[in-house]
Amino acid sequence: MKELVQASTTVAVDPAAAFAIFTEEVDAWWERGPRFRPLGPRTSKLAFEGEALVERPDDGGEPFELGRVLVWDPPERLVFSMGGRDFRPDDPLTEVEVRFAAHPKGTEVAIVHRGFEALPLDHAARHGMSGEALVGMMGLFWADLLVALRTHVHDR
């Protein structure tokens, strides 16, 4: 079974602005804390830096590379690999595809997160889940982030 996570929202800006906000203001809308950031409770800045999504702790500690940019195609598409604090260097990474499509109310931001089936069933990133349970947990993760993105766009 493919463990494919899908989530979307509509933001009230055009696709070019939505892409820019998603990538350039990622630290402002991406939630904080251990559920959303690999460095957990430490304060940090999240940013796309060159070809990587990086979390840098404010205390000057070691930064964490959350993923690598695989496709950068503004204003339509962004694809990046994604790991987490539970990933070892030789673990396969998952892949996040973000599409930005014109919509009558602005832009639909649609996320597809795939590649979980490559992780062993006992991998810590699965939190003991597989199949629909894993898809549901990760769907809520992305839904919460997309609500935060939509709120950020609205409040700008």
Image (spheres, rainbow, N blue to C red):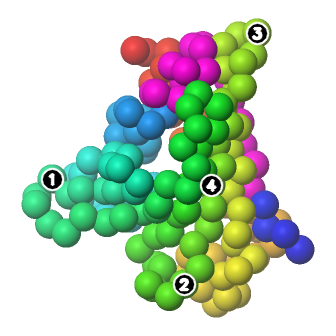
Q: Are marks 2 and 1 in contact (CB under 8 Å)?
A: no
Mark pair 4, 2: CA separation:
16 Å
Q: CA distance from mark 3 to mark 1?
A: 40 Å
| Magenta-colored span | 5-21
Residues at marks 1 and 4, CA–CA distance in whole angstroms:
26 Å
Label annotation for residue 96: 4
Type of amino acid under label 3: Pro
Look at label 4 and name its amino acid. Answer: Val
Q: Considering only order in the chain, which callout, 4 or 1, is on the residue closer to the N terminus?
A: 1
Q: Which residue is mark 3?
A: 104
Q: Residue furthest left?
A: 60
Residue 134 or 48: which is nearer the viewer?
A: 48
First along the sequence among labels 2 and 3: 2
Q: Amino acid at mark 2?
A: Asp
Three-letter residue code for mark 1: Asp
Residue at 56% over, 32% down: 74
